[in-house]
Image: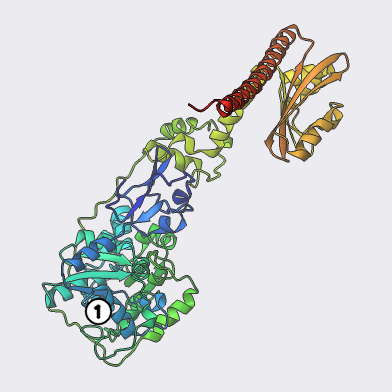
Amino acid sequence: MDVLKPVYTEQNDCQDCYKCIRECTLKAIKVVNNSAQILHNDCIYCGTCTQICPVNAKKVRDDVKRVKMMINRGDRIIVSIAPSFVTEFPNLKDDQFISALKELGFAEVSETALGAQEVSKHVASYVDSGENGVYISSACPSVVEMICKHYPEYKQNITPFLSPLLTHAKYLKEKSPDSKVVFIGPCIAKKVESDEFPELLDASLTFTDLKNWFDEENLDPYLFPEDKVNNKFIPGKAGRGILYPIDGGMIMGIKENVSATDAVYMTFSGIGNIKNVLSDLNKYGKTNKLFLELLACEGGCVNGPGTEKEYSTAIKRLEVINKLDSDEVAVLNADFSIQRNFESILPIPKYEHSENSIKEALTMIGKYSDKDEINCGGCGYNSCREFAKAYLEDRSEPNMCVSYMRKIAQDKSSALLRKIPSGVVIVNDELKIIEANQSFAGILGEEIEEVYQTIPGLVDADLKKIIPFHKLFASALTTGVDNLERDIKHENKILHVSIFSIHKHKIVGAIVRDMSQPYIQREEVVNRAKTVNRKNLETVQKIAYLLGENASETEEMLNSIVEFYKPAE
């Protein structure tokens, strides 16, 4: 279990429902021994799987213990707080929030948005002085991972700058070299940045982590008194950088830093939308400058996987905009480089599969022709061919195919029914036959046997029209009895009927035996003799027990009388 990664699977909790595969747009998940494991070389840590897993088997690495250890050993820690905290803690005053964080043991609090403002200035200058072509923002770490791993042909289009968080962390380290920097925000992918740049970012927590920590310490930020003198953001409040967590927020910051430009600015959010944007981007004619602000979370960072508050994206967006304050805005004016290259993020291998290989893989799951490819999506993949390719790449297992496994189960049950010499029938609560074997039809006579040849299994046949003792089945369905046995005279035969419940009040099954058959007679005589012998033995044991108990009581009473009349010595 890869618990050291930002996202991992708790294997014992995984129920192999394949929902995570279905929802993972990039299919960065592999099933191993019926457990869905994350392919970290493919994963962009968008956090979708952690949000949709029905049994919470997908976990986010908890870095709170690590931060607590730093506090306990006396480290001075500065919090880089994401601007979307205003949507996670609505109507909470800045100074109250800062006071609550200091109560946890943090020394100072600064806004990540300050780093965003610095990035906006650099990007504006870079685009303004650059040639015509496509420019892609480096602000969202999930998008950076996605392009570098899955669309490496566009890696050179990413603006070569640190993310707002890393820029902010670098500033804090420059100003206070002996301090640690811990990010708190809505993003899981920030944990990747803390892993890749430990010299800048010491740890990354989500808002969920923070709220759990507040609960553990029994702290309510809203109950802290206001103290605007001692509890301020350092080195001051941010300006337009706080707009970064909403669609178009970065573009607003860039435009503020250029008086005029011929660039076209567009914003897209959500992995599916970004895939669509990148799919034909190479067809762009480079007639002018196109800047793309891409955010992995649909609606922006305000809807990140590390958030707890779920409400209207429009209201969240409004809360962020209303937080913008033009007074007393701090400016970093960083005198250090925020340049970055992305060579350390390697592209995933691209596989080419021949048509013969795909067909061979399809036969593994019982797909022998096009009509067998029903593309139901039960395995988590969009089509049978996509599943076959995943199988060839060792990402899937044959038993993930629901229709294939159902067919195997049906074939096995049909084979067993055919081999059972006794008659077997299964009916629903409307006394319609779900399944029956040929022995059952044979017991009931030639006419029913002929019907069986026309309708294999007598599927959907009305039991009331086939046997006169159908009321036994109706009674078993009504009462929900687990076992009901009767000897029934049918025509010139004596039938022994054992009815059992499969799904109480919904489905029952029955084993019907013709007692006139010689092998049945011998078996029944032996069974009934054993039953009589067992009951006689039980009766003898009970009598012996009662006699023994009575003798014991009599002996005790006689001994007490002897003791009473025994002369004193």
Reply above or below: 554 against 402: above
Coloration mode: rainbow
Residue marked by disc 1? 110
Residue most toward the bottom? 327
Left or right for 443, reference 241: right
Residue 417 drawn above or below residue 267: above
Does residue 400 sit above or below 164 in this rendering?
above
Asked if 249 appears above or below 57 in the picture, the reply is below
SS at mark 1 in the image: strand
Query: For this rendering, which residue is in front, 404 or 346?
Result: 404
The residue shown at (46%, 43%) is: 16
Residue 561 in view (yes/no): yes
- Asked where in the image residue 454 lies, by quadrant, the reply is top right
Q: Amino acid at mark 1?
A: Ser
Residue at image point 13% right, 76% down: 176
Q: Looking at the image, which is closer to me, 64 or 553?
A: 553
| Residue 530: % across, % down | 67, 13
Residue at x-position 25% and y-position 71%:
165
Q: Quadrant of residue 177?
A: bottom left
Between 218 and 167, the one lying in front of the other is 218
Task: Determine the residue positioned at 21% across, 59% down.
Answer: 196
Q: Quadrant of the N terminus?
A: top left
Residue 450 x/y as whole percent:
80, 19
Q: Quadrant of residue 72?
A: bottom left
Is 271 positioned to the left or the right of 185 in the image? right
**Residue 459 percent location from the top left of the image:** 74, 31
